[in-house]
Image (cartoon, rainbow, N blue to C red):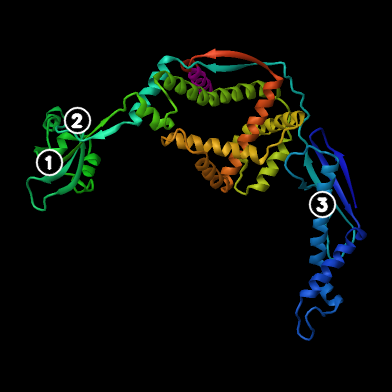
Amino acid sequence: MNVTRKDLDQLNAVLTVHIEAADYADQYDKELRHTRGKIEMPGFRKGMVPKGLVEKLYGTSIKAQVVNKLISDALYDYITNEKLDILGEPLANESDDQPKIDFEHDKDFDLLFDIALNPAIELNYDVEIPMYDIEVNDSMIDEEVARLCQNYGNYSTPEAAAEDDVVRGVVAEVVGENAIVNEHAVISVNHIKDEEQRKLFIGAKKDDVITFNPKKAMQNEAEIASFLGKSEEDIKDNDHDFTFTVTEISRYAAAEVGKELFDKIYGPDVIADEAAFRARIAEDMKKQLAADEAYRFEIDAREAIMAQIKDVAMPEAFIRRLLKEKNEDMTDEKLDKEMPEILNMLRWQVVENIIADKHELRVTEEDVMVQAKDFIRMQLRNYGLANADDKLVEEFAQKSMERKEDRERFQTRAKDIKIFDALKQDVKLKPTPISLADFNKLFETKEQTQE
């Protein structure tokens, strides 16, 4: 067995795999014996069908199976041993030079395979990339304090309704047959659009009966239908008065800054006073902003590197063919539209490989788990669990890792972090303090440029 290579240009080559009968004879006989042992045929005991008959019936398919496996192994071994940096995988050559295969009669085989080589790229690390440091100021801390106070507030049941209260009760249509009644009606006083109708609820007490018109009071038919417990079709032409018998008044009050709030958010006795509370908020905000700073560095670093290689030639014809073979829905029109982005993605993959080889990077299971835990912590924070127990985070992360799409996303993120952390060691970093407002403008400018 022999594999030879013929370069067509710097990016494309043809591999010829030559296989002789001696290369597959032993494996062919082994598979033939295995097949013979499983065959049941009238007139013969199981496994005792004559070898010649088995070979006549199954020899061609067995030879094809063995030879194809040998070809696949030969290609893999050659690419590995020669350390070829190929793009995708070998494709069967479609030229007239490809020999016709006759597994029934041929003993020796020559097969041609096209391969595409990634371009040789020399990166220039002598570039300066801003490393943004977002400033956390008092105004940002004040906003976060207000948000936390709002999130950790409490409900009370005042004697009389005010403009920001929620009123529950029984609503009943005043006139008409089959009068509409909803015993579980809920209305927010400040959502009542008509001022005169809104005044009817302000000052109302438990068991008070208010007569009002929902059509005048509310914003739209969907809101009215929900309030009355009916479909929009049921109340489409309803312009009647209704009574509302108050059963409960709820008022939400933001939490006060103090020990009770500190303990709710961070646990008992973790935060001593307001100064420590604000310092902890600043620390947490800085950690969250660090992810945004890293994301911006990735954008700027990628753009700086891609500017160097944007015109590097790629084996486009091979890529088009590979994508069409792998995706039967892929059309030439779609490829024409998406090819520039695909080529840039593949160029960046070459860059990633260069950086990974230079720094001997490897993504471990521990790296992937770190990303899974970070993702879970972010989700839990969104649900108000700012300091979730490590055991809970571990449990959710393990479950998330069992989902293939999640695991792949965590692996990709772990790889990206290693790539860009390594890149920080090679390029020139420019520390750049910046306000959050100005930092956000960086993305607005980018979007406007793309438009």
Res 309 visible: yes
Q: Amino acid at mark 2?
A: Lys
For discs 3 and 1, the disc positioned in front in the rendered view:
1
Between the residue at mark 2 and the residue at mark 1, the CA separation in whole angstroms equals 17 Å
Which region shows up in magenta? 439-451
- Does the magenta segment cover residue 296? no
- Does the magenta segment cover residue 440? yes
Q: Amino acid at mark 3?
A: Asp
Predominant SS of the magenta segment: helix
Residue 135 image point, x, y percent: 50, 15
For discs 2 and 1, the disc positioned in front in the rendered view:
1
Residue shown at 83%/37% (left/top)? 8
Q: Earlier in the sequence, mark 3 or mark 1?
A: 3
Image side of residue 422 versus residue 448, left or right = right
Quickly name the residue at label 1: 244
Residue 369 image point, x, y percent: 60, 40
Report the disc number at residue 73. 3
Q: Secondary structure at mark 3?
A: helix
Q: Earlier in the sequence, mark 2 or mark 1?
A: 2
Quickly name the residue at label 2: 193
Measured along the vertical axis of the image, is residue 445 above or below residue 267?
Answer: above
Residue shown at 20%/35% (left/top)? 157
Residue 95 image point, x, y percent: 80, 47
- Residue 225, located in which quarter of the rendered image? top left
Residue 9 image point, x, y percent: 82, 34
Extreme residue in the left direction: 175
